[in-house]
């Protein structure tokens, strides 16, 4: 049952992103931003953690969980350090993911020699 719930919740999140791109004619960058902000808002309202408890990886793998991580890091550090903690908390919690994306993106660019857009 856990796998089914993860599949359904993760599928719904991904379907929302696909609908935004297909029906809303949004670019992938705008869609990504909307999903991160939505995850952050849902987390701030206290609704994302129950979704993770219900669906597990179905809620932690999609990009909405990045917004959840940013929000939870900011809240935790704000409680400890005040307003300065809001900024440092976001980066403290998500720094490994951001660093990995930069390093692996750089390595992929070295290996596959991407070309710029040709007009």
Image (spheres, rainbow, N blue to C red):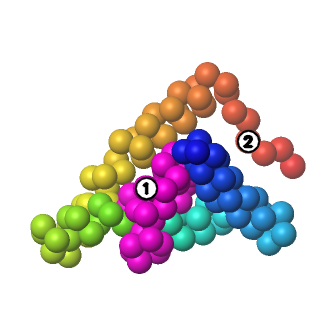
**Considering depth in this image, is 109 or 48 the residue closer to the camera?**
48
Horizontal arrangement in the rendering, residue 94 relative to residue 66 (left or right): left
In the image, residue 29 lies in the stretch drawn in magenta: no
Q: Secondary structure at mark 2?
A: loop
Query: Which residue is disc 2 drawn over?
Result: 116
Query: Which residue is disc 1 drawn over?
Result: 53
User: Residue 27: image x %, image y %?
Assistant: 74, 62
In the image, residue 56 lies in the stretch drawn in magenta: yes
**Considering depth in this image, is 93 or 57 the residue closer to the camera?**
57
Camera-nearest label, 1 or 2: 1
Image point (51%, 32%), residue name: 104
Residue 66 seen in the figure: no
User: Residue 117: image x %, image y %?
Assistant: 78, 45
**Considering depth in this image, is 41 or 84 the residue closer to the camera?**
41
Image point (66%, 66%), residue name: 30
Marker disc for residue 90 = none
Horizontal arrangement in the rendering, residue 33 relative to residue 89 (left or right): right
* The furthest residue to the left: 80
User: Residue 3: image x %, image y %?
Assistant: 59, 42
In the image, which residues are magenta?
41-70
Horizontal arrangement in the rendering, residue 24 relative to residue 60 (left or right): right
Image point (48%, 49%), residue name: 56
Q: Secondary structure at mark 1?
A: helix
CA gap between label 1 and label 2 equals 43 Å
């Amino acid at each position: 049952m856990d796998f089914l719930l993860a599949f359904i919740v993760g599928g719904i999140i991904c379907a929302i992103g696909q609908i935004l791109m297909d029906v809303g004619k949004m670019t992938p960058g705008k869609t990504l931003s909307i999903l991160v902000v939505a995850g952050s808002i849902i987390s701030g309202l206290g609704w994302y953690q129950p979704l993770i408890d219900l669906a597990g990886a179905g809620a932690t793998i999609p990009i909405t969980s990045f917004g959840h991580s940013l929000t939870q890091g900011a809240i935790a550090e704000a409680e400890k350090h005040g307003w300065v903690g809001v900024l440092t908390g976001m980066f403290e919690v998500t720094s490994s993911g951001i660093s990995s994306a930069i390093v692996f993106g750089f390595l992929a660019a070295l290996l596959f020699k991407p070309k710029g857009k040709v007009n």
